[in-house]
Image: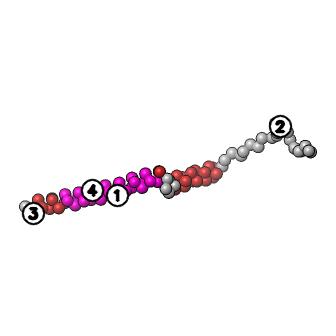
Amino acid sequence: MAKAKGAHPKTKAVKIAPRKSAEAKANDANARDAMANKGPRPGSNAAKKADAAAAKAKAKAKADKAEAKKAKALALKRAKV
């Protein structure tokens, strides 16, 4: 078997990565933000928890609205007397 030409692995020049430009850093940050804004994967436990929390909040808002309506009706009733 012929020996492969080239530098010996131990003496091989290590490529030094160029410093990141501000633009590259901004792109990375934007990509991270985009991933974060995507939210949990559909069907995952995190998504189910988020859905449950949203449903709970919606139910609470509905109950609060009904409570406010009752209070308003009662206040009007008292005002008439």
Q: Earlier in the sequence, mark 1 or mark 3?
A: 1
Q: Residue at x 31, y 55 (%)?
A: 60
Q: Nearer the viewer, mark 3 or mark 4?
A: 4
**Residue bearing mark 1:** 58
Q: Earlier in the sequence, mark 3 or mark 4?
A: 4
Q: Residue at x 60, y 51 (%)?
A: 28
**Residue bearing mark 3:** 80
Task: Report x, y in % for residue 19.
Answer: 69, 45
Residue type, numbered disc 2? Thr
SS at mark 3 in the image: helix
Residue type, numbered disc 3? Lys
How many marks can you see? Answer: 4
Q: Nearer the viewer, mark 1 or mark 3?
A: 1
Q: Residues within 10 Å of mark 1 (few under 14, many from 20)?
A: few
Q: Earlier in the sequence, mark 2 or mark 1?
A: 2
Q: Which stretch did the figure color magenta?
A: 47-71
Q: Earlier in the sequence, mark 2 or mark 3?
A: 2
Measured in 3D between alpha carbons, the distance from the residue under mark 2 to the one under mark 1, in whole angstroms, is 65 Å
Point out which mark residue 11 bears. 2
Measured in 3D between alpha carbons, the distance from the residue under mark 2 to the one under mark 4, in whole angstroms, is 73 Å
Q: Residue at x 52, y 52 (%)?
A: 36
